[in-house]
Amino acid sequence: MEKYEKLEKVGEGTYGKVYKAKDKASGQLVALKKTRLEMDEEGVPPTALREVSLLQMLSQSLYIVRLLCVEHVDTNKNGGSKANLYLVFEYLDTDLKKFIDSHRKGPNPRPLPPSLIQSFLFQLCNGVAHCHSHGVLHRDLKPQNLLLDKEKGILKIADLGLGRAFTVPLKSYTHEIVTLWYRAPEVLLGSTHYSTAVDMWSVGCIFAEMVRRQALFPGDSEFQQLLHIFRLLGTPTEKQWPGVTSLKDWHVYPRWEPQNLERAVPSLSPEGVDLLSKMLKYDPAERISAKAAMDHPYFDSLDKSQF
Amino acid sequence: MAELENPSLMPNLITYLSCLLQKVAESNDVNCRFQPQKVSVFHGLTRPTISIQSYLDRIYKYANCSPSCFIVAYIYLDRFAQKQPTLPINSFNVHRLLITSVMVAAKFMDDIYYNNAYYAKVGGISTTEMNYLEVDFLFGLGFHLNVAPNTFHTYFTYLQREIMLQPPPSNAESSLSLDRSLKVHLCFNEEESSHQNQQQQLAV
């Protein structure tokens, strides 16, 4: 690892520390994600294992963070050996969470420019469509996992540690995934056979959050999370979402009527509200796909040739 | 893939895979007699006394992973054989390759899986060794763990067909490279065990 000069620790990833570093030879900035492979009982964390193999497949998209290489380092010190796995990524200076925060608080609070929201959302849909077309669910889309190149206005999806291939039959999926605020209702209700639609729900929540500069459904428990959703979109019915009342964690909930979605995102154009409502459809089968979203009229005014 | 739920499929699949691997290993044992063999971390000092069939039965009994994992593990072994032509499957390494490939398949595919220490116990090796095998297997595969649906389907249909045509592995030409590798990949005399390299690198 002498090739890289560690500059600073920039965070804790799903399975280890992340450093900003410089490739000494080229001067290129990189992010080093370190995974300790102590001789412990877990071996290589499955999150690391999935992230590397999925990114290898997906990294050719401009809207997915680029994995440059993987290094396994064994250092023998004083008879004891220490093993680490380093994932070397391209470095991006910020993420969407920090970016939204900087527009909400600080010296100069201001809304995100509508054209920027439109561009970021398009790039996000583009990246998600790329994952889905390769049979990969991200499962943990949230503003922290969307890296930004502020200067170029580029958004890239990162942190595929919870990603998985969804294409072969498996034991039922765990629902201990996805930060609560962006978690789809079918996951919250204990559905075990969910699909690409879970990512699109997260995309909808992120879209609304860029417009509002605050989370759309900030629940602090699974139950509260559902209530947040039901209060805005109405308590789902069998008619709207066939099968909902037979999901594992369905209970009898208060009956809320759907509110007007526009009121949650007052500054959004009617086309934007329409797209958002399609991303937040209760029935996963009805929820818009990433690919279809890219063709939605909301993006008509966007110059797509730049992507 | 409702066929995977068929209760009689798995025992047949396990038997078939055992026979196939045994054939591959034995054939490579013969080939290697003429040339010294490249040694890897997977290579045991002695030939394990437990048969491949009993070993795989044991893994199947205790690993408790999705049936798909065994198909995926088979795909990994096939990829490994293609990417590491100088490391053919033989009687000295087949057990370690097997336990490692099933473990990696379960870790990659299943949300709920046992840890390396558990697999080490099932496989009859130490946790430290299991961890080393895992890293070498991953780099040997170039971390190519994802299995596209059509790939899975191709292998699955092939295995199903072969299982129906009992007795298990015939001597006929197979379309898969694990079989091919036994014919093409003889042993080379390359003196580099992957752990002599202190640093392994994967360019993506």
Image: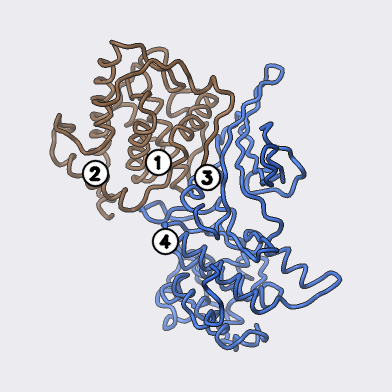
Chain colours: A blue, B brown
Seen at 37% across and 43% down, the residue is B69
Q: Residue at x 31, y 48 (%)?
A: B151
Q: Position of residue B173 (x, y in %)?
A: 16, 33
Residue under label 1, please give it: B64
Look at label 4 and name its amino acid: Ser
- Percent position of residue A288, x then y: 46, 75
Query: Could you tell me which secondary element the residue under label 1 belongs to?
Result: loop
Query: Which quadrant would residue A79 be assigned to in this image?
Result: top right
| Residue type (three-letter) at the residue carrying disc 2 | Leu
* Inter-mark Cα distance, 1 to 2: 15 Å
Find the distance from the CA under tag 4 to the CA under tag 2: 31 Å
Q: Does residue B53 appear left or right of residue A287 in this picture?
A: left
Please give the chain letter of the residue carrying mark 1: B
Describe residue A66's horizontal placement relative to residue A94 as left or right.
left
Chain letter of mark 4 equals A
Assign a secondary structure to mark 2: helix
**Secondary structure type for disc 4:** helix
Q: Please determine whether, in this image, residue B22 is positioned above or below residue B204.
A: above
Q: Chain of mark 2?
A: B
Q: Which residue is mark 4?
A: A133
Q: Which quadrant: the N terminus of chain A?
A: top right
Give the camera-side residue of A117 and B148. A117
Residue at the spot of label 3 = A52
* Residue A149 at x, y percent in the picture: 67, 60
Three-letter residue code for mark 1:
Asn
Marks 2 and 3, how far apart at CA: 32 Å
Question: Which of marks 4 and 3 precedes in the sequence?
Answer: 3
